[in-house]
Amino acid sequence: MSDAQPMRTPLRQVRGLGSARSGTSHFWYQRLTSVAGVPLTIGLLLIITALLGRSHAAVVQILGSPIVAIVMLLFIINTAYHMWIGMQEIILDYVHEAKWKFLALMANTFFVFGVSLASIYAILKLSFGV
Amino acid sequence: MVMSIVHRITGAALYFGMLLLAWWLIAAATGPNAYANVEWFMGSLIGQLILFGYTWALLHHMLGGIRHLIWDTIHGFEPAEREMFTLATLIGSIALTLILWVVGYLVMGGPR
């Protein structure tokens, strides 16, 4: 075994990683949430249009009714995942210094969780009136 | 080229715009006074401009996203097809935005 090739290859440095350390699963989930996003976005626009100019009491009643609340919840959850992946992609493309990259990725997660959970809480409160 | 960065810019704008949706929902869940504040802001000139831009960004991002999904099936890469997609996304998003706002104002009476 003179002239032996090293047994280690660079493969181990990239397997399952990528710049976000999460492999290629995000690519697929971004497509999945895109497809789901089309009907859910149309649903959201219809709901908002139907609520234009209505009184607070009417808006509360409609937003809290089952079909509307379910569409809103699906939209918010689907969008949360989609926007989280999308912003991560933007951060990874433009922020290269490790410290800032991970701070930005953390901020992305905090923002998405905060905004989405607040929206979900509001829908549930309108639905169950607690 | 340009359409690619516009897709990204509209995505980033929609990202922060989710704050508006959250504000609206939380205000509705809070009570009539909080909801009146949202209605006042959304009905103001600045609010209307933001909402109009937001409507267009959402529709443009949606149509541009459909374009990307078609490309994922390895179709639509011919020059003529790409031109057609670009026009369809632009004209489609502007037309749909105008239709929605005309319906919003004429049929639903707009924000009050």
Image (cartoon, coloured by chain):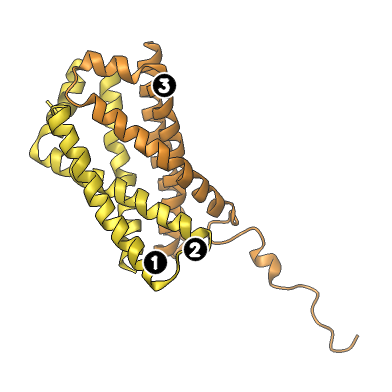
Chain colours: A orange, B yellow
Query: SS of the residue at dot 1?
Result: helix
Query: SS of the residue at dot 2?
Result: loop
Image quadrant where one finds the C terminus of chain B: top left
The mark tally for this picture is 3
Q: Nearer the viewer, residue B5 or B108?
A: B108
Residue pictured at 30% horizontal, 35% vertical: A45
* Residue type for callout 2: His
Query: SS of the residue at dot 3?
Result: helix
Q: Return the residue at label 3.
A: A67
Q: Return the residue at label 1.
A: B81
Query: Are marks 2 and 3 in one subunit?
Result: no
Image quadrant where one finds the N terminus of chain B: bottom left
Query: Where's residue A69, x and y in %?
Result: 39, 22
Check the residue under mark 3 and report the chain it is in.
Answer: A
Q: CA distance from mark 2 to mark 3?
A: 36 Å
For label 3, the crowd category at 10 Å Cα-Cα, with few meaning under 14, some 14 to 19 and many 20 or more, is few
* Residue type for callout 1: Glu
For label 1, the crowd category at 10 Å Cα-Cα, with few meaning under 14, some 14 to 19 and many 20 or more, is few
Residue pictured at 41% horizontal, 30% vertical: A117
Query: Where's residue B72, x and y in %?
Result: 51, 59
User: Tags 1 and 2 in contact by the CB under 8 Å rule?
Assistant: yes
Query: Are marks 1 and 2 in one subunit?
Result: yes
